Image: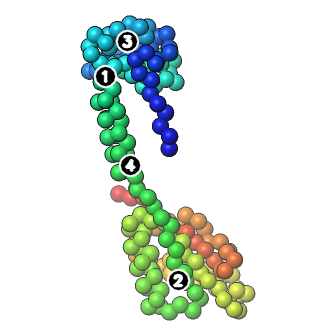
Amino acid sequence: MKQERLRINNQIKSAELRVLDDEGGNLGVITSREALKIAQDRGLDLIEISPAARPPVAKITDYGKFQYEQKKKAKAAKANTKITETKVVQVKIGTGEHDLNLKANNVSKWLKEGHRVKIDLYLVGRAKYSDESFKKERLERILKLISEEYKVADEPKRSPKGFTVVIEKVHGKK
């Protein structure tokens, strides 16, 4: 992600600017020369913070302090982002109850952590050609064992090896 370079002081090309002072007050729309003179009188810099606006918005502040605050905000935003993974669980038609319970516990734990979970029902041999309702019933078997509340993000679909369903945690519950 490339950050565009800010224009400061004499680099600002616009004739008029909407200017904010260092205390957050609005000085209104003034010429860039007047704004630069005000900034120099205060011993500060004129920084163009929103060049796309009409007229562009500039702020009178210390450039070093402004850069420090921008980096601090970016670091805080990066710290608050949460990466979710899609975890995968593979189940076969003949998987026993105990193994299904273990897999369902793992799925519940992952859902609690906020991850999406893809459950693959593998079909081998004659099971590939069995009745559709039988296959869906086998997939429902593991879904019933999951203790965490979830919603189906992707309906059960046929995949090359069998059936696949994607579930995720229900958000916004009070």
Place of residue 60 in the rendered image (x, y in percent of width and height, measured from the top left): 33, 19
Which one is earlier in the sequence, the residue at label 3 or at label 4? 3
Q: Label 3 amino acid?
A: Leu
Marks 3 and 2: CB-CB under 8 Å? no
Residue 36 disc label = 3
Q: CA distance from mark 3 to mark 2?
A: 71 Å
Which one is earlier in the sequence, the residue at label 3 or at label 1? 3
The residue nearer to you, when weighing 77 against 9, is 9
In this view, the mark in front (3 or 4): 3
Which one is earlier in the sequence, the residue at label 3 or at label 2? 3
Which quadrant holds residue 6?
top left
Instruction: From the image, tell me which residue sits under label 4.
Output: 78
In this view, the mark in front (4 or 2): 4
Q: CA distance from mark 3 to mark 4?
A: 34 Å
Marks 2 and 1: CB-CB under 8 Å? no
Q: Residue at x 35, y 45 (%)?
A: 75
The residue nearer to you, when weighing 7 against 128, is 7
